[in-house]
Amino acid sequence: MTLAPLRRTYVQGRNGQIHLRLAGNPGGDKRPMLCFHLSPSSGVVYENWLAEMGKDRLIVAPDTPGYGMSDFPPEQPTIGTFAEAMTDVMDALDIKDADIMGYHTGSKTCVELARQQPDRIKHLVLISAPIYTEADLAKQNSEMGSPDTPVEDGSHLIHSWAGLWRWRGPEQTPADIMYAFPDHIRGGERKHWGHAAAFSYTYPENIPAVKQPILVINTNDDLVVYTRRIREHLANGKVIELMDWGHGFLDYHTEETAAFVRPFLDQDIWPDTAE
Amino acid sequence: MKRGYVDSDMGQMHYWKTGSGPNLVLLHQSTQTAEEYKDMAAFLEDKYTVWAIEWLGHGMTDDPTREPEMADYTRTVIQAMDALGIDKAAMLGHHGGGSICIDIAAQQPDRVTHIVASGTGHRSPEELEGLLKHRTDTAQPEITADGAFLNKMWNIYATLGGPNTPMSLMHRVFLVNMKERMRPYDAHDPILKWNKAEACAKLTCPVLLMQGELDTFVTGQEHLLDVIEDSRRVVMKDIGAFLFYEAPEEIAKVVDEFLSEG
């Protein structure tokens, strides 16, 4: 995998510096787009997507506070904390209104940002939007909602690696997984903060309030079953199911994804297969 | 601590800055990043403006689009210093970072007030040839689906610290290294092939040679005392190859004492 042509910078947020990757130029006729990553990861997952969408708009992928190169917030964050940080990014970059994309935890940040800033957020693209039962949530919390402590024999590394490998996308290679792995584990004792925030925020409580168009992309990843429950909660949204795709699709199906996301963002045209 | 980027002719360079006072520029070793100096900076920031610059192909600095030469590493650090307005500075570098400090001071003697060259050694042509061959012959562990390479690398890293180095600290070192090992170009070879002796002979500023006693990567450092006119040497007892992680307060004290000399 080669690095996409993009630039990186920091902006000052209310809880410290926020690191971001960006491509494209401000001032074009297309609305800027912001992309929020899954946890525990960083904006690295969007590098190829930025290169593609940056051809005709400003596109920004911040590192969520506590991940990548962004400062840790002073206290364990909520999805609300993450959404406030993304407002800080928009303000710092003088972005008046934007379309937003979120990946897993980032999808919840999208919904909360759209609730907090209804006049500034125009479209949402959610990569997975899981709705959990009590039992699902207990399982997710037990697997991902607590700290990941290093142990002398290195078995924690194999454990984290196995989790990523198990849910790899169909095209992803060991080298692809390794590319994302360091950002996956660098949070150490605070690595679980993003998951804990996500598991405390529910779509049924929050997503009905979002009236902007929402396109949910449901690929065959670890949240596919839970995401199928989202439809009835969407006030103005559709779901596109892509069962041949999984994690890594933004790298391996970059142009195909852009081919249905651009019309959605720019002309309010839903993908043909979205329901 | 403020982090940021400046431009060089080979891409964006990432840095952090903390404190106030005379400039002290820190250059990390190959396959590490400015993370290496974060702990030590806390003991120096009250007296110095401490800068850590990540050189080409390391940390958040861009990867070069071709295999760099030593001149590329040096030039782009100089460009970063220019962009950051660092007209005059003491410089500290570890392993390959020490070599870049020496190269900068040899090229711009008026700009560099002091050098701390940590883990910078000397090899005869025969020793160097042997090391380069060993490096060529030693393959990195293959990245495999079972993740076994992670354990293999971790087991190596767990032994590189000193006897008092906690596992959690070596885990930090390991995480940084793991990411850096995936970069397209390894800086070790171009730096090893660079003519260090020629640059050392040009140095006019005071130089402190430093070495972790258990740093197995360093050899022949004492030879540099004969090559560098104004030099002295300190060996940090019971400390390994990652001394700035391992003993930040102790080393900060040594650095401050050296920089405070008349």
Image (spheres, helix red, strand yellow):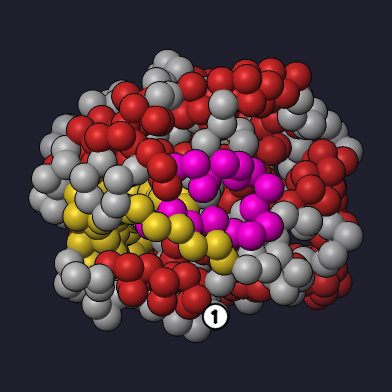
Q: Residue at x 27, y 80 (%)?
A: B46
Q: Is residue A87 visible?
A: no
Q: Residue at x 42, y 47 (%)?
A: B225
Q: Does residue B145 appear left or right of residue B215 in this picture?
A: right
Q: Residue at x 49, y 62 (%)?
A: B234
Q: Residue at x 23, y 26 (%)?
A: B9
Q: Does residue A91 appear left or right of residue A45 in this picture?
A: left
| Numbered range of the magenta stretch | B208-224
Circle 1 is placed at which residue position? Answer: A76
Q: Examine the rendered structure and indicate whether residue B35 appears above or below residue A148.
A: above
Residue B220 magenta-highlighted:
yes
The quadrant of the picture occupied by the N terminus of chain B is bottom left
Residue A103 magenta-highlighted:
no
The quadrant of the picture occupied by the C terminus of chain B is bottom left
Q: Examine the rendered structure and indicate whether residue A135 appears above or below residue B135.
A: below
Position in image of residue B147 (x %, y %): 84, 41
Position in image of residue A111 (x %, y %): 47, 61
**Hey, which residue is sitting farthest front in the picture?**
B226
Q: Secondary structure at mark 1?
A: loop
Q: Which amino acid type corresponds to the residue marked 1 in the rendered image? A: Gln
Q: Is residue B239 visible?
A: yes
Position in image of residue B50 (x %, y %): 28, 64
Q: Examine the rendered structure and indicate whether residue B148 appears above or below residue B19.
A: above
Q: Examine the rendered structure and indicate whether residue A97 appears above or below residue B79.
A: below
Which chain does the residue under circle 1 lie in?
A: A
Q: Residues within 10 Å of mark 1 (few under 14, many from 20)?
A: some
Q: Pick whichever, A90 or A116, lies toward us.
A: A90
Position in image of residue A113 (x %, y %): 39, 64
Q: Pick whichever, A222 or B186, lies toward us.
A: B186
